[in-house]
Amino acid sequence: MSQRRSRATVLRRRARRRRERKRMLRIGAITISVALALSAVFVGVGLLTAPRGERYCAERPQTFPDQGVAGWSGDQLMNAAIIVSTARTLGFGRDGQVLGVMAAMGESSLHNIGYGDWETSGVRNPDGSRTSSIGLFQQQKWWGSDEERMDPATAATKFYVRLGKIAGWQQLPPSHAIHRVQINADQEHYARFQDDATAVVDALSGPCPG
């Protein structure tokens, strides 16, 4: 009797341990399911509440925010819009639009100025002559007349016509592609404006009212 009771006790203990393991597995499975469900909820709430960049019609300056975009505002944003609209008219997509805005940021801080490096820094051309750069893109006199270079849309057109003649410009680092057009001293000069230019171009990509 003693041996039978001892064996029965062992069997009961084994059965109890199996039940306990199954219970723990069920609790673990439920815990994982709840955690996954909560994660999905939090992700969904995050997507719904995350800030979304505003989009503005490039052809409607009156819609542009007073605070600007990425620190660029007022006439800077309006000049960027002219560059973006000109690029679109000439068939350049987002990448080309970003390059044009980057170039003008690096050359004139997006102000349509009637002076250039000679007036501000006494810079001369390689042949010793005074630089004659003016406008958004700081184009020198061989780019066209003063009136053409000081007209933002015409100046942007001249930039894009030359950019379009550079084979494989899309594969070049953006600053290098701009350098090939502008022929400045430092091919990395424009790189620091890429993020800002991208933000501005994206902000000016909104639909225009019919």
Image (cartoon, rainbow, N blue to C red):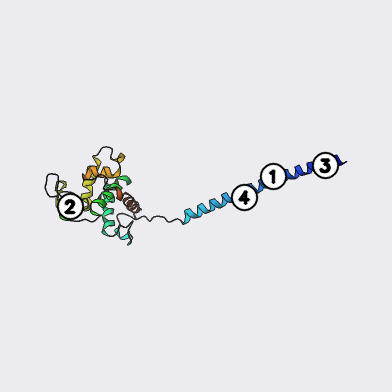
Q: CA distance from mark 1 to mark 3?
A: 23 Å
Front position among marks 4 and 1: 1
Q: Which mark is residue 6?
A: 3
In this figure, which residue is indicated by the disc labeled 4? 31
Along the line of sight, the residue nearer the viewer: 87 or 49: 49
User: Dot 4, how many residues are within 10 Å of its Cα: few (below 14), some (14-19), or many (20+)?
Assistant: few
Residue found 71% across the figure and 46% down from its top = 20
Density class for disc 2 (Cα within 10 Å; few <14, some 14-19, many ≥20) is some
> Which quarter shows the C terminus?
bottom left
Residue type for callout 3: Ser
Q: Counting residues from the N terminus, which is met first, the one under dot 3 or under dot 2?
A: 3
Type of the residue with mark 1: Arg
Give the left or right position of residue 102, taking residue 135 as reference.
right
Q: Please state which of the two labelled residues, at mark 3 or mark 4, is closer to the viewer.
A: 3
Q: Earlier in the sequence, mark 1 or mark 2?
A: 1
Can residue 8 be seen at all in this image of the molecule? yes
Along the horizontal axis of the image, is 12 left or right of 29?
right
Label ID, residue 112: none
Q: Mark 1 and mark 2: span between their CA atoms?
A: 80 Å
The amino acid type found where label 2 is placed reads Asp
Question: Mark 2 highlights which residue?
Answer: 117
Amino acid type at image mark 4: Thr
Look at the image and tell me whether residue 161 can be seen. no
Q: Nearer the viewer, mark 3 or mark 2?
A: 3
Pointers 2 and 4 in contact (CB under 8 A)? no
Q: Nearer the viewer, residue 89 or 117?
A: 117
Please name the residue that numbered disc 1 is placed on: 21
Sooner in the amino-acid sequence: mark 1 or mark 3: 3
| Residue projecting furthest to the right | 1
Mark 2: secondary structure: helix
**Number of marks:** 4
